[in-house]
Amino acid sequence: MIERCKENPIITPADVKPSREGYRVLGAFNPGAVRFGDEILLLLRVAEGCEPREGYACVPVYRFEEGRSYPDILAFWLDDPEVELKDTRGVAYRGRNYLSTISHIRLARSRDGVHFTVEDRPFIYPIDEREEYGVEDARVTFIEGRYYINYTAVSRDSWATALAVTDDFHTVERLGLIFHPENKDVALFPERIGGKYYALHRPNNSGFGKASIWIAESPDLIHWGNHRCIVRPRDNPWESVKIGGGAPPVKTDEGWLIIYHGKGEAGYSLFGLLLDLEEPWRVVRRGATPLLTPEEPYEREGFFGNVVFSNGVVEKDGRLYIYYGASDETTCLAVADVNDILASL
Amino acid sequence: MIERCKENPIITPADVKPSREGYRVLGAFNPGAVRFGDEILLLLRVAEGCEPREGYACVPVYRFEEGRSYPDILAFWLDDPEVELKDTRGVAYRGRNYLSTISHIRLARSRDGVHFTVEDRPFIYPIDEREEYGVEDARVTFIEGRYYINYTAVSRDSWATALAVTDDFHTVERLGLIFHPENKDVALFPERIGGKYYALHRPNNSGFGKASIWIAESPDLIHWGNHRCIVRPRDNPWESVKIGGGAPPVKTDEGWLIIYHGKGEAGYSLFGLLLDLEEPWRVVRRGATPLLTPEEPYEREGFFGNVVFSNGVVEKDGRLYIYYGASDETTCLAVADVNDILASL
């Protein structure tokens, strides 16, 4: 039913120019996706580390100075007793943690939806302390004539969801954090329902319960309230740990179609979910089994293996183009008829 | 400078009638506080457990049926191999957790601010699954003629902050969850600033960083956005673990006065903080040392010792009546001149 593109992975780190000398691209994955004119645009998450340097641990950082921000490199001398290596993810120095990778959002453009040209420069990158550890996993939603982009903003204060808006994919206006930490996997509905905007979101509860899909409503896309938990993990190998929303919901005659991800002991997979058109907090149907699980070598091995994760889908002639990150490293494509997905739920 | 009331603790569990036969009151603490006519009202957090029953582990639960809710008791036979005791906090049965205590909000009324009469019945209690494990730590703020009450709603989906409103402290209208999990220690500012409502809140990040005080803004008190982290823990015995807002901010000539709590290895204490009147996300001054630490026996020992925690203050003739929970068990009072507190910051 769902067919992987024969050219998968369609974008790899080798296709992406580092954003700075001394950086190297480790991942080009988890893209947001949208039609823009006669193009399909992907908003890639580009994760970068530093080129290795003998005797040093090098980490990428952003500097913020007088309204300007730029990428930089910190090099820690490994013989310094105050330098402490933290697994593969970073370095601690004098009690402060530095991550070994940092992400920004990069545009890639295509006319056929399969062959993409990746731009040379970052599109959305950290501009202040709320984003100091990177911006990740963009979703883009066309709402009332403008393109709203939400993404995960990572900082010393944890991770939260930021909103930005663009008309032309050149200039971007920041609209602040719309969901406080810890929250990611936010998907804006493309139109108002009963006069209100809606979003799916995913608080990361460490208290009771498991990380689940919530819905919130807003009068203006900036301010959000009436949070409700609507879909929880199930006890199966693909969902038992946590679940989260994916790309913006796709409107169908039968309801809002959501491609969400689940995490279980077997890895990350994709499921289908149908929400009521008028009351989107009501679940109409939910796939009993995953639509897509990691099977191909590029899905099973990579920066972080056994992961398929989608935050960008585009509908084209009744078919759903599901762009997805594989193994937190590459961008892939799978295509399915919308009606086939609906019938499978 | 700050003076404890000689009659502390002014309310104890013995002063509170259980809300159901078979329940026993374990705590009457962490009150919200507000002037109402010529009274001072406290909104007590009343924590209840079950009377012990030989051979059984009994836990309090709320039942929700057809729009009605009522407290009930579940008794687990200790010889059942599927019953598992979880430290002092609860019971697990067939993979589900039940807590050994549940909280509701109870009103207490006073004319002098020291001697209170506790009402016989709960004021705010769980009415649906979003509150199934209890409602805790109310704050009440008088805004534009109405009394807004925010409180922690605890459920299988973790804890979040709910908003309600009342005009008369008899009927209460629920306004939904205003901050998704995990979030507590929410304090609404009593008036609009530059046309917007503001709230302090406290996301509980388990990722990077430590739980800190954030600010958010709203057009309507229901929907919140532009979240910003404004005050972080400091490296001292009273704040090194986490901090959180307390009672609603008190307006002074020098700024918004906040009595916040810090948690460190020494326990929970109270600090003073001054935020800018026009730009409340800016810190004007912050006390270097606590205003109040657990020193008295009732503050050092109890249900959970070494805790002073305030979410209700009332200004009266230039003096601040700081109501506070002691050891998660009783309600106490400390009084200080507002000017003395300001001078100490």
Image (cartoon, coloured by chain):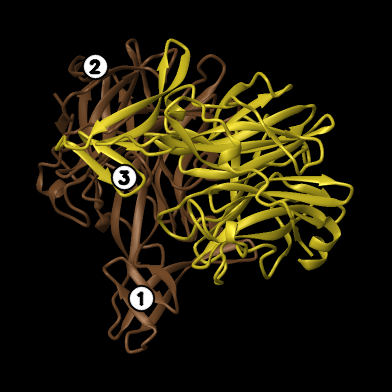
Chain colours: A brown, B yellow
Q: How far apart are marks 1 and 2 (CA)?
A: 48 Å
Asked which secondary structure carries label 3, the reply is strand
Q: Where is residue A142 in the image (x, y as percent from the top left)?
A: 47, 29
Give the crowd class for mark 2: few <14, some 14-19, many >=20 residues within 10 Å: some
For residue A245, say whether it is visible. no
In front of the other: B297 or B198: B297
Residue matched to label 3: A30
- Left/right placement of residue A335 relative to residue A312 reads left
For residue B288, say whether it is visible. yes
Residue matched to label 1: A58
Q: Where is residue A265 in the image (x, y as percent from the top left)?
A: 16, 45
Asked which secondary structure carries label 1, the reply is strand
User: What number is the disc on residue B209?
Assistant: none
Are dots 1 and 2 on a single chain?
A: yes
Give the crowd class for mark 1: few <14, some 14-19, many >=20 residues within 10 Å: many
First in residue order: circle 1 vs circle 2: 1
Q: Mark 1 near mark 2, Cβ–Cβ under 8 Å?
A: no
Name the chain letter of the residue that bears numbered label 1: A
Q: Mark 1 near mark 3, Cβ–Cβ under 8 Å?
A: no
Can you say which quadrant of the picture contains the N terminus of chain A?
top left
Q: Looking at the picture, which amino acid does disc 3 mark?
A: Asn
Q: Mark 2 near mark 3, Cβ–Cβ under 8 Å?
A: no
Q: Position of residue A117 (x, y in %)?
A: 32, 47
Is residue B237 depicted above or below A344 in this figure?
below
Residue matched to label 2: A342
Asked which secondary structure carries label 2, the reply is helix
Find residue A102 and report its image quarter: bottom left
First in residue order: circle 2 vs circle 3: 3
